[in-house]
Image (cartoon, rainbow, N blue to C red):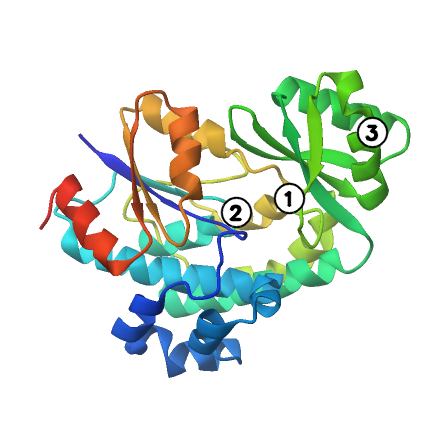
């Protein structure tokens, strides 16, 4: 029975994350990584402060690095390769690196550029995101369409799991959505603490700014299928295009999980800080088996459960 690996996105970062992998892998996460980033990765993850680690241009490369190091530990301990991989937003880059489509150094450099581009786009004008409780995609699309009909800017940004839908738009439009959600079948609208309207047209400047970095980054055919956020399908030949489309398109994470299950995958391994993607898999796929690898110890334990090498 095969399994898929899942990687978390921004929001899963926490001060102190990856302490064991930083101690074990200075070759991967030490001076070479600091030189690529231009700031001290290990020190920032260990001591923050939280406000700094939460910044988009810090959180993204930090999560990529820690998650990838955990992947290598798991990969070296498990007997069989995964049948598929996916990542939520930023995590898609980690999934591609895990599959060999991106080298670690190239991936870290690209993720750092992505974080800076998204932070710059978010700083252009007030915008944000909100979670919709008690709503499916139909209610979310209706709410966003109603906002746009009145001249607003609101779009569905994340389809994470049943009952976990996120919209993105201008700050005033997020406020409008909170006030009018019930009129469109949404039980409650909760504004999220994020820097901007990610995965929406607000990120078009970020896609523009990231184009050169994507086009100059070497990319190879992945060793196993990596599912793209923008389509909910495996990446094909033009991986770079998919990564740029991801910035302005909704994250179709639930669609990817369901399609994997339909292909016979019923075991999912979250690799990285937190356990968000394991929870999304559990909500999306009834009866699936989930595991979490957020430490080196868990990498060994889960590898044993999957089948140690």
Q: Identify the mark nearer the N-term, 2 or 3.
A: 2
Compared with 133, 37 (above or below) is below
**In the picture, residue 53 is in which quadrant?**
bottom right
Q: Nearer the viewer, residue 197 or 188?
A: 188
Q: Which mark is residue 89?
A: 2
Badge 3 marks a residue whose secondary structure is helix
Q: Which residue ends up furthest to the left in the rendered image?
A: 309
Residue 190 shows up from this direction: yes
89 lies left or right of 308: right
- Do residues under tags 2 and 3 come within 8 Å of each other at their CB atoms? no
128 lies left or right of 272: right
Badge 2 marks a residue whose secondary structure is loop
Q: Nearer the viewer, residue 21 or 51?
A: 51
Mark 2 packing: few (<14 Cα in 10 Å), some, or many (20+)?
many
205 lies left or right of 65: right
- Do residues under tags 1 and 2 come within 8 Å of each other at their CB atoms? yes
Residue 212 shows up from this direction: no
Q: Position of residue 240 (x, y in %)?
A: 51, 52
Q: Nearer the viewer, residue 156 or 195?
A: 195
C-alpha separation, residue under disc 2 versus residue under disc 3: 28 Å
| Residue tagged 3 | 179
Labels in figure, total: 3
Q: Which mark is residue 199?
A: 1
Q: Residue at x 13, y 46 (%)?
A: 304
Q: Residue at x 49, y 34 (%)?
A: 253
Q: Which residue ends up furthest to the right in the rendered image?
A: 150
Badge 1 marks a residue whose secondary structure is loop
């Amino acid at each position: 029975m095969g399994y898929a690996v899942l990687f978390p996105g921004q929001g899963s970062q926490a001060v102190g994350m990856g302490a064991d992998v930083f101690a074990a892998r200075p070759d991967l996460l030490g001076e070479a990584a600091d030189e690529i980033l231009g700031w001290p990765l290990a020190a920032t993850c260990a001591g923050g402060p939280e406000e700094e680690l939460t910044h988009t241009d810090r959180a993204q490369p930090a999560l990529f690095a820690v998650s990838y190091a955990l992947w290598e530990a798991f990969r070296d301990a498990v007997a069989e390769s995964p049948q598929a991989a996916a990542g939520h937003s930023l995590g898609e880059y980690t999934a591609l690196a895990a599959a060999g489509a991106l080298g670690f150094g190239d991936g870290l450099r690209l993720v750092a550029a992505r974080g800076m581009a998204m932070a710059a786009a978010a700083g252009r004008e007030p915008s944000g995101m909100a979670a919709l409780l008690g709503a499916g995609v139909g209610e979310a699309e209706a709410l966003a369409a109603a906002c746009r009909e009145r001249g607003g800017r609101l779009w569905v940004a994340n389809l994470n799991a049943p009952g976990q839908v996120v919209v993105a738009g201008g700050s005033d439009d997020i406020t409008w959505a909170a006030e009018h959600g019930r009129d469109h079948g949404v039980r409650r609208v909760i504004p999220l603490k994020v820097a901007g309207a990610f995965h929406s047209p607000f990120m078009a400047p970020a896609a523009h700014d990231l184009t050169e970095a994507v086009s100059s980054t070497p990319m190879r055919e992945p060793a196993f299928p990596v599912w793209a956020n923008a389509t909910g399908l495996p990446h094909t030949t033009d991986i770079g295009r998919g990564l740029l489309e991801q910035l302005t398109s909704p994250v179709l994470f639930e669609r990817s999980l369901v399609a994997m299950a339909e292909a016979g995958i019923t075991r999912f391994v979250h690799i990285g800080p937190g356990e968000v993607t394991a929870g999304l898999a559990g909500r999306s796929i009834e009866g699936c088996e989930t595991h979490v690898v957020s430490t080196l110890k868990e990498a060994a334990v889960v590898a044993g459960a999957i089948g140690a090498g």
